[in-house]
């Protein structure tokens, strides 16, 4: 018997399987989807079995597989096919596709750590008579006798509870033995289920979803309409049929509240899966799924690859979120992977959002997806009132950060002992440090961007490559004490709030305050328990969080996302502002939202103010149609990158000529131009954008282009189908 094996190296030049002989002692155990140890050149490395066959046509000498790395780990047929689909969709190497599907502790590389965690127990190794004889024979060995008496009364005892020197003596005499029991690091809470009475909208959604049919549904529900309760009820019905379910959420910060809800409803039948877990915790959760100990997986993007069998439903909450698209190789969108698993298992796929992406809504209105609307909030809560404040007018009154309406309402909420949320989608202290004397500005030496100042550490930092430098008191160019900071980040905003409201308890949630494990959950729980009055942060506070005492949301600078030169900036702004506004007034207390902007007449902001998604959708679709953008056209981005400026520039020109020669004449080729972020980490980047409706030559041409760069060690090509940013 022979096995085709993908080796652990992800180089495109060896992106193929290699044939190995299966030795006789492994024939019974080896399966497709297993990790194996194989000889490759002078080394012994890890590989991945993709096929097993009885006969081959090779006429050269073959080597034998050395061993199976893990007999208990094996990707099933569905995931093997999903990996092949991922590779074909993104043009990554085969091994990269399978690596992406696995947690770090199980990737196809040399496994240097045993991620299993055990409790160590001690139990008797001899009969009761033998033990009693020993106790009678050695009455002065009090410590050993104490341990033996404990074990006579209990089947086994934790080793940590017993005396170590005496234990060693009993182990040497073979009177006791050690027993290991594998445990999981994450222990789920018990069931504390509340009785839910469904609203008319929720019941309508449940009635219109057929769990026995392969279909994609869009649940378009306003913030607070109770979409999560619909998801829970659908999953209950699926689990009752002994099927499994995946719920995907966009942010780690969202998993805290949603996971607790699922623990309350389903107890230990839930596994969680996201990048905030340690390698050991991911290993444990993956094992639970692999061993079929759970029916439900709740997680972020990578959870779509978990090895659940007998899948009954996939739910993607906040489906519009850009975090569902991976921005590094392989550049897949979770929706494509979910559609594959939906089709493979003939099951429903549920997409939920208060602000669906334009592509999703277009498909729903055309009947490609089944459309379900939930236009009302649950219970007595109503959508908050939204006020747009013109900061140009406020600046005349010297209100540079907080407008008068926001100041007064923040003070009002403090007096009423209610809570407020402030959104500023920029972390750090200030965005630019420059010299008033000579005009010098601190920039990253490796990237085409100004450094962001972080006052807490005293560092200027690049948010692209991580470069950091200590900020001195004098200008490094003219040596004058004339350094000034411009721009506003969450760190500076926190200090300004404390100056404005000294009695307010303020907590900040951004990438800097949530670096440590468990930080998201800690901040959310403290704010929920009213240990703080004001939560400020970046976009991670805008979605999914539910705090009954929050009655005020302030958006400090609505123009931050609106003015980005990207065709999706309006859509992003509408989603972000609508979502963060939805954090206010989620209980019986009415909510208010203050949006500060220098563009009060902007159409997108007016739609946010009126909570009018359909008006925004129709306006944006008109613009997209005029400019040949999605959903009317598909997009593909092709970038060349190199540390050599000239090499990258020459290659992108060659790419343009190749595309013109091979693509359909209806395909629009834009560029080449420099990429929006032209230089990152000393690498120069050039870009071509393709717009097309149907091009039978497209995929073949892209694959050929990818192969042409396979042996080019100076210039790299990056192909991204349906990019979310240009």
Image (spheres, grey):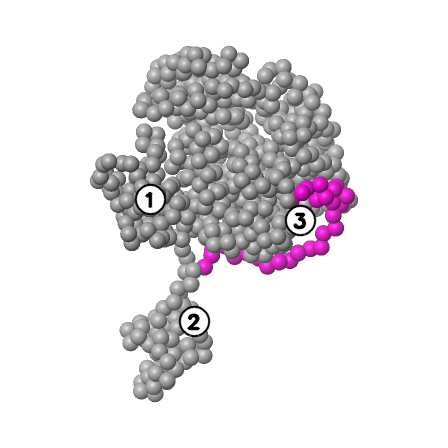
Residue shown at 31% from the left, 46% from the top: 1
Residue 530 position within the rendered picture, expressed as x and y whole percent measured from the top left: 64, 49
Q: Dots 1 and 3: beta carbons under 8 Å?
A: no
Distance between mark 1 and mark 3 Cα atoms? 48 Å
Q: Which residue is mark 1?
A: 54
- The answer to which of 435 and 560 lies nearer the viewer is 560
Q: Foreground mark, 1 or 3? A: 1
Q: Which residue is mark 3?
A: 233
Say which label, 1 or 3, has the lower sequence index: 1
Q: Foreground mark, 1 or 2? A: 1
- Name above or below for residue 580 compared with residue 625: below
Q: Is residue 340 visible?
A: yes
Please indicate whether residue 461 sits to the left or right of residue 421 in the image.
left
Distance between mark 2 and mark 3 Cα atoms? 42 Å
Residue 562 position within the rendered picture, expressed as x and y whole percent measured from the top left: 60, 24
Distance between mark 1 and mark 2 Cα atoms? 50 Å
Helix, strand or loop for disc 1: loop
Q: Residue furthest bottom?
A: 136
Helix, strand or loop for disc 2: strand
Q: Which residue is mark 2?
A: 157
- Name above or below for residue 169 compared with residue 597: below
Look at the image and say whether residue 441 sits in the magenta stretch: no
Look at the image and say whether residue 188 sits in the magenta stretch: yes
Q: What's the magenta region? A: 183-211
Q: Quadrant of residue 360?
A: top right
- Name above or below for residue 263 compared with residue 674: below
- Name above or below for residue 7 compared with residue 388: below
């Amino acid at each position: 018997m022979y096995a085709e094996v993908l080796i652990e190296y992800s180089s495109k030049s060896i992106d193929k399987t290699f044939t190995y002989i299966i030795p006789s002692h492994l024939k019974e155990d080896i399966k497709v989807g297993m990790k194996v140890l194989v000889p490759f050149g002078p080394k012994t490395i890890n590989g991945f079995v993709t096929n097993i066959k009885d006969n081959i046509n090779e006429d050269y000498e073959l080597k034998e597989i050395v061993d199976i790395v893990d007999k208990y780990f094996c990707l099933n047929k569905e995931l093997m096919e999903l990996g092949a689909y991922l590779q074909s969709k993104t043009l990554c190497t085969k091994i990269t596709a399978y690596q992406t599907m696995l947690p770090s502790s199980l990737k196809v590389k040399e496994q240097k750590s045993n991620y299993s965690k055990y409790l160590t127990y001690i139990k008797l190794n001899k009969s009761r008579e033998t033990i009693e004889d020993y106790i009678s024979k050695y009455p002065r060995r009090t410590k050993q006798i104490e341990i033996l008496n404990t074990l006579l009364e209990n089947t086994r005892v934790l080793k940590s509870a017993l005396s170590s020197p005496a234990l060693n003596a009993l182990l040497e005499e073979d009177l006791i033995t050690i027993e290991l029991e594998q445990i999981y690091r994450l222990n789920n809470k018990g069931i504390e289920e509340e009785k839910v009475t469904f609203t008319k909208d929720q019941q309508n959604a449940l009635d219109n979803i057929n769990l026995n049919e392969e279909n994609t549904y869009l649940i378009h529900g306003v913030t607070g309409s109770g979409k999560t309760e619909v998801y829970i009820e659908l999953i209950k019905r699926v689990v009752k049929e002994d099927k499994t379910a995946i719920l995907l959420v966009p942010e780690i910060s969202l998993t805290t509240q949603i996971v607790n809800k699922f623990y309350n409803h389903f107890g230990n039948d839930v596994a969680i899966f996201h990048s905030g877990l340690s390698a050991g915790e991911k290993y444990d959760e993956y094992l639970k799924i692999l061993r079929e100990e759970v029916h439900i997986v709740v997680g972020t993007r990578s959870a779509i690859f978990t090895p659940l069998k007998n899948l009954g439903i996939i739910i993607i909450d906040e489906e519009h979120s850009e975090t569902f698209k991976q921005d590094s190789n392989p550049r897949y969108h979770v929706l494509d992977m979910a559609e594959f698993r939906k089709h493979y298992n003939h099951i429903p796929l549920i997409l939920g959002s208060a602000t669906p992406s334009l592509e999703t809504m277009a498909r729903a209105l055309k009947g490609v997806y089944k459309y379900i609307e939930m236009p009302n909030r649950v219970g007595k809560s109503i959508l908050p009132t939204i006020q747009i404040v013109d900061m140009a007018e406020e600046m005349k009154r010297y209100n540079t950060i907080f407008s008068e309406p926001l100041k007064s309402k923040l003070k009002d909420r403090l007096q009423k002992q209610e809570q407020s949320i402030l959104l500023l989608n920029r972390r750090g202290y200030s965005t630019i440090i420059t010299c008033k004397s000579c005009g010098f500005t601190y920039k990253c030496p490796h990237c085409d961007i100004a450094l962001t100042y972080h006052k807490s550490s005293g560092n200027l930092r690049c948010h692209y490559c991580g470069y950091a430098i200590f900020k001195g008191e004098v200008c490094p160019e003219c040596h004058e004490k004339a350094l000034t900071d411009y721009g506003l980040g969450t760190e500076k905003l926190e200090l300004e709030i404390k100056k404005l409201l000294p009695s307010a308890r303020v907590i900040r949630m951004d990438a800097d305050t949530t670096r440590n494990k468990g930080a998201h959950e800690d901040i959310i729980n403290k704010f929920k328990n009213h240990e703080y009055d004001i939560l400020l942060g970046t976009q991670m506070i805008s979605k999914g969080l539910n705090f009954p005492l929050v009655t005020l949301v302030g958006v400090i600078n609505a123009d931050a996302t609106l003015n980005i030169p990207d065709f999706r900036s309006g859509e992003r702004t509408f989603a972000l502002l609508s979502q963060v506004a939805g954090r206010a007034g989620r209980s019986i207390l009415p909510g208010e939202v203050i949006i500060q902007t220098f563009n009060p007449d902007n159409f997108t902001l007016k739609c946010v103010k009126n909570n009018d998604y359909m008006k925004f959708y129709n306006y944006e679709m008109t613009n997209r149609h005029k400019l040949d953008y999605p959903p009317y056209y598909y997009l593909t981005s092709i970038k060349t990158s190199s540390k050599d400026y000239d090499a990258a520039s020459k290659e992108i020109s060659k790419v343009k000529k190749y595309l013109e020669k091979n693509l359909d004449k209806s395909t629009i080729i834009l560029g080449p131009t420099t990429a929006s972020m032209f230089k990152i980490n000393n690498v120069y980047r050039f870009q071509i954008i393709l717009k097309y409706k149907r091009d039978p030559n497209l995929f073949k041409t892209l694959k050929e282009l990818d192969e042409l760069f396979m042996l080019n060690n100076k210039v790299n090509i990056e192909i991204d189908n349906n990019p979310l940013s240009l």
